[in-house]
Amino acid sequence: MSRNLTLTSLACLTLAACGTPQEQCISRNTDEYRTVSRLLAQVEGNLARGYAWDERVVTRTELDFCPAILRNKDGDRVLVQRSCWRDVADTERFRVPIDPVVEQRKAENLRGRLAALRPNAERAVQACRAAYPEEG
């Protein structure tokens, strides 16, 4: 039960890294635990899907409107919108084949690392809660 509360606290605090002093303390002291946990979730997702996701930046050209300063017949400067071509960068996700044996080995190694980090992370959470009690 305590372990589940600790893990839930760690997940919630990931989102609130700039929160209370207690949350900042927990976030600072459980960074490696959260990183390994995130990597394990990613590897388990890859195994469940049968492939991994990767991203690449794709540049395309699109027609847009660009401001331009022209002079009218009286010589006054006038701001107008002209059509122009602009390069736009998009991030594209694509599937990457995985080797299930290698991914399973990664998952086992990450589970072992997570188990080794858990006691220190739990102690850090308890110490931060003691050092920075929240009123509520």
Image (cartoon, rainbow, N blue to C red):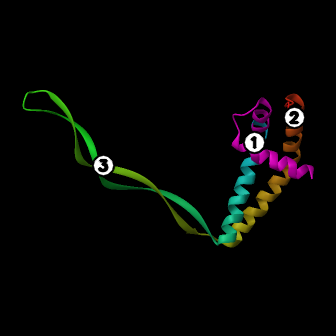
Image height of 106 relative to 8, above or below: below
Q: Nearer the viewer, residue 45 or 102?
A: 45
Q: Which mark is residue 109?
A: none
Say whether residue 41 is visible. Answer: yes
Q: Which mark is residue 129?
A: 2
In 3D space, how far apart are the residues under numbered discs 3 and 1 (Cα atoms)? 40 Å
Q: Which residues are magenta?
A: 1-27
Disc 3 or 1, which lies upstream in sequence?
1
Marks 3 and 2, Cα distance to the nearest angstrom?
52 Å
Please say if the residues under marks 3 and 2 sit with CB atoms less than 8 Å apart.
no
Quarter residue 44 falls in: bottom right
Of the pair 61 and 106, the residue shown nearer to us: 61
Q: Residues within 10 Å of mark 2 (few under 14, many from 20)?
A: some
**Residue placed most toward the observer, 42 or 23:** 23
Tag 3: residue type?
Arg
Question: Which badge, 2 or 1, is on the more N-terminal residue?
Answer: 1
Judging from the image, what secondary structure is the residue with disc 3 in? strand
- Residue 117 visible within the image: no
Residue 118, magenta (yes or no)? no
Identify the residue at image location x=85%, y=47%: 6
- Residue 6 belongs to magenta span: yes
Tell me the residue at 75%/63% (across/down).
107
Q: Quadrant of the C terminus?
A: top right
**Crowding near the residue tagged with mark 1, few <14, some 14–19, many ≥20 C-alpha atoms within 10 Å:** many
Residue to which mark 1 is pinned: 13
Q: Which residue is painted at 89% across and 40% down in the image?
A: 123
Task: Tell me if 34 is positioned left or right of 80 in this view.
Answer: right
Secondary structure mainly formed by the magenta segment: helix
Q: Say left or right for 5 vs 37.
A: right
What is the x, y in percent for residue 135? 85, 30
